[in-house]
Amino acid sequence: MTSVRVAPVPAAPARPRLRLVPPTYVPSRLRQRRRQRLVMAGVAVLAVMFLGAVVAHNLLIQGQVRLQQIEAEVGNQQARYQRLRLEVGRLESPERIVAAAQQQLGMVPPPGVTYLSPDGPLSGTTETGDDAGGAEAGGAPTPAWAAMKPHLGPLGR
């Protein structure tokens, strides 16, 4: 008989001690992924903020350009208004009106000016004011009425 030898069984390696994992434990791989996502989200937020700043600056510059254009137009219109006021003043001047009346319309200055005053009685009128028609007590028109009557228009205008 042969003897059978039994080979010794290697001893199992010693197991590490098991420990209780706290509920807040996060594996390192998962922590690394979260950190990468957080960094990417931060970069995306910064990019959006930068783009927003660029857009806001662009709008500000466009508004400033428009404001300058409007201010230039206001200046031009104010200068035009002053030129037109000067032209109106020139056209309204009495010297120009008299010259135009004489040259274009053939008008001439009057030889004399007679001023009428409503305060005093006209020659030939009664003191009581009964002379509404401009006639003397005898029915004949007064000289002043006879001189004015041709220059008056028809009644009922």
Image (cartoon, rainbow, N blue to C red):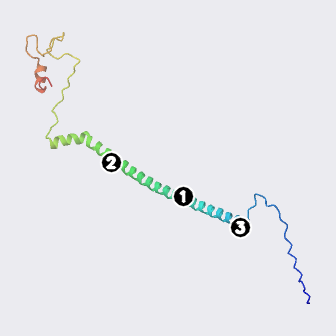
Q: Alpha-carbon neighbours of circle 3 within 10 Å: few (<14), some, or many (≥20)?
A: few
Q: Where's the C terminus, which quadrant? A: top left
Please, is residue 142 above or below residue 115 in the view?
Answer: above
Write down the residue under mark 2: 83
Write down the residue under mark 1: 52
Q: Residue at x 50, y 55 (%)?
A: 60
Q: Which mark is residue 29?
A: 3
Q: Residue at x 22, y 40 (%)?
A: 97
Q: Secondary structure at mark 2?
A: helix
Q: Where's the N terminus, which quadrant? A: bottom right
Residue 86 lies, in percent from the top left, at 31, 45
Q: Earlier along the polypeptide chain: callout 3 or callout 2? A: 3
Three-letter amino acid code at the position of disc 2: Arg
Q: CA distance from mark 3 to mark 2?
A: 81 Å
Residue 23 lies, in percent from the top left, at 76, 57
Q: Earlier along the polypeptide chain: callout 1 or callout 2? A: 1
- Residue 118 occupies quadrant: top left
Q: Alpha-carbon neighbours of circle 2 within 10 Å: few (<14), some, or many (≥20)?
A: few
Residue 2 lies, in percent from the top left, at 91, 90
Q: Residue at x 14, y 41 (%)?
A: 105
Which is more foreground, mark 3 or mark 1? 3
Three-letter amino acid code at the position of disc 1: Gly
Q: Alpha-carbon neighbours of circle 1 within 10 Å: few (<14), some, or many (≥20)?
A: few
